[in-house]
Image: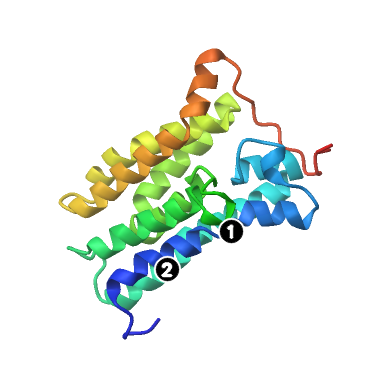
């Protein structure tokens, strides 16, 4: 990172980092256009189309898109602050990297649903909130075998968890509200399918699914 770069250019760079369509690129490496065989380019769909291992790899990559650059930025600008106050820059960069993943310009502004990238952002700024949301996501997903239910419950719990573990850190709370709200918005088609009883159950195999 360079000190000569205006701080307010960082959100633009974070958007570009988030916009790297990792799931799509993984599909192309296997000769598959993920968009033609599922709902989006996110890790869940990668797992359904290419297999469990590829799905986990996509989740890890999308998580790192949110975690690594934001963690480095935080360390660069706030090296001595455990919970930096007044940093709207961190909030904007966190939202920018999520937005880049959700609305990547390289694919007509159609991307993933932001769960893994949002988890990375939370890991960089609010690890306790991430721990609560991730635990709820795992439990709900295993019990219902429905990823979208786990994702929606994890999104809803973000604001109260932020208020509980980081009292008085209002920018963290606002980030939790915006990230959670965006995740719910991106899952509106899943909500419709859940209400209709047609949402897909999780059934990842370790092998690639036949996409023909």
Q: Point out which mark residue 13 bears.
A: 2
Q: Residue furthest left?
A: 168
In the image, is 203 to the left or to the right of 168? right
Q: In the picture shown, does residue 12 fall above or below 123?
A: below
Question: Which element carries disc 1, helix, strand or loop?
Answer: helix
Res. 141 visible in picture: yes
Residue 15: % across, % down: 43, 60
Few, some or many C-alpha atoms within 10 Å of disc 1 (few <14, some 14-19, many ≥20)? some
Residue drawn at x 51%, y 27% as measured from the top left? 189
Q: Secondary structure at mark 2?
A: helix
Whether residue 165 appears in this view of the structure is no
What residue is rendered at 27% in x and 64% in y? Answer: 89
Quadrant into which the N terminus falls = bottom left
Q: Quadrant of the C terminus?
A: top right
Which residue is located at x 60 percent, y 41 percent? Answer: 40
User: Observer-nearest residue: 109 or 65?
Assistant: 109
| Corner quadrant of residue 125 | bottom left
Residue 150 position, x and y percent, is 50, 33
């Amino acid at each position: 990172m360079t000190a000569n770069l205006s701080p307010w250019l960082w959100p633009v760079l974070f958007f570009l980092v988030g916009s790297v369509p990792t799931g799509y690129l993984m599909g192309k490496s296997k000769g598959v256009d993920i968009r033609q065989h599922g709902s989006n380019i996110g890790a869940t769909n990668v797992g359904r189309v290419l297999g469990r291992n590829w799905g986990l790899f996509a989740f890890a990559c999308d998580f790192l898109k949110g975690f690594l650059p934001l963690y480095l930025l935080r360390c660069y600008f706030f090296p001595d602050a455990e919970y930096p106050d007044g940093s709207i820059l961190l909030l904007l960069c966190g939202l920018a990297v999520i937005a880049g993943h959700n609305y990547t310009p390289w694919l007509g502004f159609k991307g993933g649903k932001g769960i893994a990238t949002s988890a990375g952002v939370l890991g960089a700024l609010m690890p306790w909130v991430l721990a609560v949301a991730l635990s709820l996501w795992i439990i709900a997903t295993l019990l219902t075998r429905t990823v979208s239910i786990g994702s929606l419950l994890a999104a809803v719990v973000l604001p109260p968890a932020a208020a509980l573990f980081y009292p008085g850190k209002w920018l963290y709370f606002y980030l939790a509200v915006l990230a959670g709200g965006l995740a719910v918005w991106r899952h509106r088609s899943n909500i419709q399918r859940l209400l209709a009883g047609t949402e897909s159950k999780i059934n990842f195999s370790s092998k690639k699914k036949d996409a023909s």
